Image (spheres, helix red, strand yellow):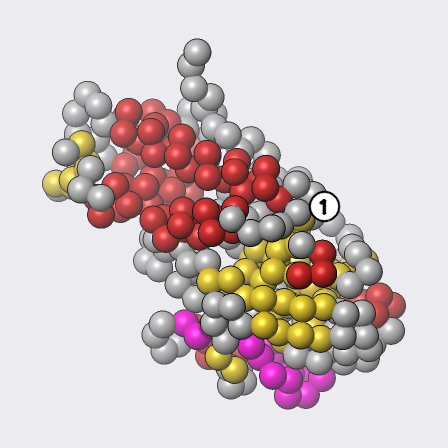
């Protein structure tokens, strides 16, 4: 029986989500309104807790629409006028960029995240960062978050396990539709696969992703993500079985179901796989052409 072309078959294209909504007794969301082919309707920013001062998890990219919706969502969904603290998954702009609006609206609030390994990206917050790391527990009324270090998409990435719901805020590690980008400069697919397996080992039932809808069957989705990347790896190796190829040619052989305008994004994924395989000494590059060892 032939292997499928892909495991994850849905995408962010055409997805719509409400401006703000209550998702559970202790989780609400306010949409970041930064739509795109990889962000879907935009970044999900979350209000976590049952009290009058919930945690704000991620801040979007910082667009006026979100800064208008956030106070309204706080008031209507939480009966709140101000968050207690801000918890950030990682320092990519569409997760930390709205922090300047948070400061303008509510004054100085503690901002908790794992520091980026080098100077620069965390400065986008515009305020000092309170450093946290793997297994740090962040508590608020009605909710307990435990940080889970999940590098691969970003070197500082933390997911947050919500103990009361056996739920997981996955940031960009797992999305509500489609698959995660592994950036050329700062991504690491080997680390990312390790992160997925770490999440699979958790007692988790539901996923609140940073993009797209809530995922009700966490274990199934995490397993699909692992299987999808393992399939892509086999496809990359299969594309090279008859001799050396450039990345663009590998993309053409593998992504036969993807329109041409998405081939640049597909090439980024292929490069991530090739870097992982090169680290494992299973492929080698020479003059822009890749071959199996």
Q: Is residue 216 visible?
A: yes
Q: Which residue is drawn at 34% across and 28% down?
A: 235
Locate the C terminus by quadrant: top left
Measuring from the top left, give residue 98's x and y in whole percent.
61, 72
Corner quadrant of residue 15 = top right
Label 1: which residue?
16
Q: In the figure, residue 139 lies in which quadrant?
A: bottom right
**Residue 103 in magenta?**
yes
- Along the horizontal axis of the image, is 198 left or right of 22? left
Q: In this view, does 72 lie above or below 3?
A: below
Residue 69 x/y as whole percent: 77, 67
Q: In which quarter of the image is the N terminus?
A: top left
Which residue of the protein is positioned furthest toward the left in this rendering?
A: 286
Pinpoint residue 264: horizontal percent, then vertical percent.
Answer: 39, 41
Q: Does dot 1 land on a helix, a strand or a loop?
A: loop
Q: Is residue 98 visible?
A: no
Viewer-proximal residue, 135 or 74?
135
Residue 91 at x, y = what percent?
48, 68
Residue reaching furthest bottom? 108
Which one is in front, 159 or 34? 159
Residue occupying the far top of the picture: 1
Residue, x 75% and y 61% (percent of image)? 27
Does 164 sit left or right of 6 as displayed? right
Q: Is residue 41 above or below residue 72?
A: above
Whether residue 98 is in magenta: the answer is yes
* Extent of the magenta region: 97-116
Q: How many labels does the image show?
A: 1
Identified at 82% across, 77% down, the residue is 52
In the image, is residue 181 above or below residue 59? above
The foreground one among 232 and 72 is 232
């Amino acid at each position: 029986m032939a292997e499928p072309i892909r495991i994850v078959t849905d995408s962010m294209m055409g997805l719509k989500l409400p401006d703000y909504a209550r998702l559970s007794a202790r989780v609400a969301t306010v949409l970041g309104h930064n739509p795109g082919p990889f962000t879907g309707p935009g970044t999900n920013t979350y209000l976590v807790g049952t009290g009058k001062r919930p945690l704000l998890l991620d801040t979007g990219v910082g667009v006026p629409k979100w800064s208008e919706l956030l106070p309204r969502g706080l008031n209507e969904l939480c009966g709140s006028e101000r968050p207690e603290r801000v918890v950030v998954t990682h320092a990519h702009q569409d997760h930390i960029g709205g922090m300047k609006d948070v400061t303008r609206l509510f004054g100085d609030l503690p901002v908790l995240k794992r520091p980026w390994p080098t100077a620069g990206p965390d400065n986008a917050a515009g305020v000092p960062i309170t450093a946290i790391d793997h297994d740090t527990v962040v508590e608020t009324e009605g909710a307990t978050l435990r940080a889970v270090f999940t590098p691969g998409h970003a070197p500082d990435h933390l997911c947050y396990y919500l103990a009361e719901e056996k739920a997981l805020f996955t940031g960009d590690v797992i999305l509500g539709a489609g698959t995660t980008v592994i950036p050329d400069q700062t991504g690491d697919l080997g680390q990312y696969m390790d992160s997925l397996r770490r999440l699979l080992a958790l007692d988790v039932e539901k996923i609140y992703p940073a993009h797209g809808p809530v995922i009700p069957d966490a274990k199934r989705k995490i397993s699909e993500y692992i299987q999808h990347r393992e399939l892509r790896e086999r496809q990359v190796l299969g594309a090279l079985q008859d001799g050396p190829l450039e990345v663009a040619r590998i993309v053409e052989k593998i992504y036969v179901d993807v329109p041409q305008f998405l081939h640049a994004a597909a090439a980024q994924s292929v490069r991530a796989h090739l870097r992982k395989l090169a680290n494992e000494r299973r492929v080698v590059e020479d003059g822009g052409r890749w071959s199996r060892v």
